[in-house]
Image (spheres, grey):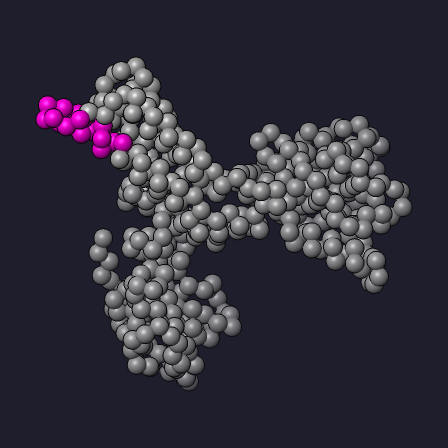
């Protein structure tokens, strides 16, 4: 697809900042950026220092030149790095438009990278996933997808399927022209190998270290370790003396199809030095690694309700077998580690939050890709059944075409404009 025009956009967050980045891509990107920065047009990859006379003075700028094809879009790309004063940024954008470039549409830089063969469809989606990542687990999965994890295996499956379809169609088209027909046994054997490859290719199952992390946080003696033991089956030391937990305990919790690592950290109240300070540092480190935080308070005593992010925090009142000190706040979960009351509800709440935050991911695939692979597998199984029943190559070929089309939505071979519009509708300008 021809993309002759040059586009530009502010690629750093809007508003005042120490630095701002204006990105251009297209045949005139280097020339326009050089004119704005007052430097010669760069002919090679590198950095040039210049200045922009604007707003009653001259602002120092840097021009980063990335000639095609060694750039993100495989076009000439230029980035102007300048002080992040809003009037200066607006002036640079105005000059880019006056020089003949047009403002990029949402996701257009990444869309050009896709159309120019720099990345695949799944990698394009992963760019947005990385931008929107709200946890370390989400960012890891996006990085795996951007690296093309599983892509080569899927491409090999797709190639094998295309070869089988070609042989089956040749049997249909040239049955009267001395072209050897492919037999039913060979069709079944090759279909079996393709289905096996499809099952093994892109699942990307997460290792235990990659599992989402859920942290039990709260003051000493809130019942965190008792709750940790009840949920994981572990035997962490429990004592009425505050500060018993000094290290971060870890265990696995499974709720339906979702599993996560549960972390029990030392209580929030740590001393300024010594063992208390070390325990407090461990607690902060655990919080930084957590995808979800369960804020635990002793429901039988007066408690505070910390500021909560509904998407990342769950408020838990422990010791529900004792007389409650106050009504439970809205959407909180009351539990008893002694009787087991409320534990099932807490597991379900935590699993739902993990699923929402991280995709409950045991796969490096997006839901769209997983659905496309499911359709491909179903079509292959129909083709397998048609071959077993001797229904004829026409029926088998139709199922193989459907499977190849579905896989093409993942590999990018069947990336229609409608599909691309749906993917890039989620992007922001400048990406």
Out of 136 and 195, give the one closest to the viewer.
195
Residue 38 place in picture, x, y as percent: 33, 81
Q: Residue at x 81, y 30 (%)?
A: 338
Q: Is residue 66 magenta?
A: no
- Identify the image quadrant of the C terminus: bottom left
Picture coordinates of residue 414, whole percent (x, y): 29, 41
From this view, report whether residue 264 is shown above or below residue 18: above
- Which residue is at a point 29% across and 75% down the rendered structure image? 43
Snapshot quadrant of residue 422: top left
**Residue occupying image coordinates x 85% and y 50%:** 243
Residue at the right extreme, as displayed: 241
Residue 13 is at least partly visible in this image: yes
Q: On the picture, is 3 further left or further right than 278?
A: left
Location of residue 232 by image quarter: top right
The span picked out in magenta is 164-180
* Residue drawn at the location 67% of the way across and 35% of the way down: 253
Residue 429 horizontal side relative to residue 206, left or right: left
Most extreme residue toward the top, as rendered? 389
In the image: residue 254, left or right of residue 424: right
């Amino acid at each position: 697809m021809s993309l002759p025009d040059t586009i530009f956009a502010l690629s750093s967050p809007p508003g005042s900042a120490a630095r701002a980045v204006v990105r251009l891509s297209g045949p005139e990107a280097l020339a326009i950026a050089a004119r704005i920065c007052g430097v010669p047009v760069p002919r090679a990859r590198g950095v040039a220092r210049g200045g922009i006379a604007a707003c009653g003075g001259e602002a120092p700028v840097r021009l980063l030149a990335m000639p095609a094809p060694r750039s993100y879009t495989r076009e000439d790309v230029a980035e102007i790095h300048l002080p992040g004063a809003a009037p200066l940024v607006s002036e640079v954008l105005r000059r880019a438009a006056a020089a003949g470039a047009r403002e990029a549409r949402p996701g257009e830089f990444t869309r050009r990278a896709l159309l120019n063969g720099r990345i695949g469809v799944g990698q394009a989606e992963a760019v947005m996933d990385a931008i929107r990542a709200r946890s370390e687990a989400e960012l890891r999965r996006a990085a795996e997808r951007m690296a093309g994890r599983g892509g080569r295996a899927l491409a090999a499956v797709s190639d094998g399927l295309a070869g089988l379809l070609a042989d089956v169609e040749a049997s249909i088209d040239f049955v009267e022209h001395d072209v050897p027909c492919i037999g039913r046994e060979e069709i079944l054997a090759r279909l079996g190998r393709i289905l096996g490859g499809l099952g093994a290719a892109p699942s990307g199952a997460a290792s235990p270290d990659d599992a989402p992390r859920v942290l039990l946080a709260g003051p000493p003696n809130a019942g965190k370790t008792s709750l940790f033991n009840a949920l994981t089956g572990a035997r962490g030391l429990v004592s009425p003396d505050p500060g018993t937990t000094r290290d971060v305990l870890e265990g696995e919790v499974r709720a339906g199809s979702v599993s996560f690592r549960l972390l029990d950290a030392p209580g929030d109240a740590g001393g300024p030095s010594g063992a208390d300070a070390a325990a407090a540092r461990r607690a902060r480190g655990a919080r930084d690694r957590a995808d979800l935080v369960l804020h635990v308070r002793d429901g039988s005593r007066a408690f505070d309700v910390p500021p909560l992010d509904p998407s990342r925090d769950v408020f838990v009142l422990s010791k529900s077998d004792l007389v409650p000190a106050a009504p439970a706040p809205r959407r909180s979960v009351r539990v008893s580690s002694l009787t087991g009351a409320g534990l099932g509800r807490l597991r379900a709440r935590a699993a739902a939050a993990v699923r929402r935050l991280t995709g409950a991911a045991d796969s490096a695939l997006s839901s769209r890709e997983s659905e496309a692979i499911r359709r491909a597998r179903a079509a292959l199984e129909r083709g397998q059944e048609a071959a077993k029943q001797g229904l004829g190559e026409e029926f088998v070929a139709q199922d193989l075409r459907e499977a190849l089309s579905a896989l093409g939505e993942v590999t990018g071979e069947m990336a229609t404009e409608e599909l691309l519009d749906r993917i890039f509708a989620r992007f922001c300008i400048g990406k």
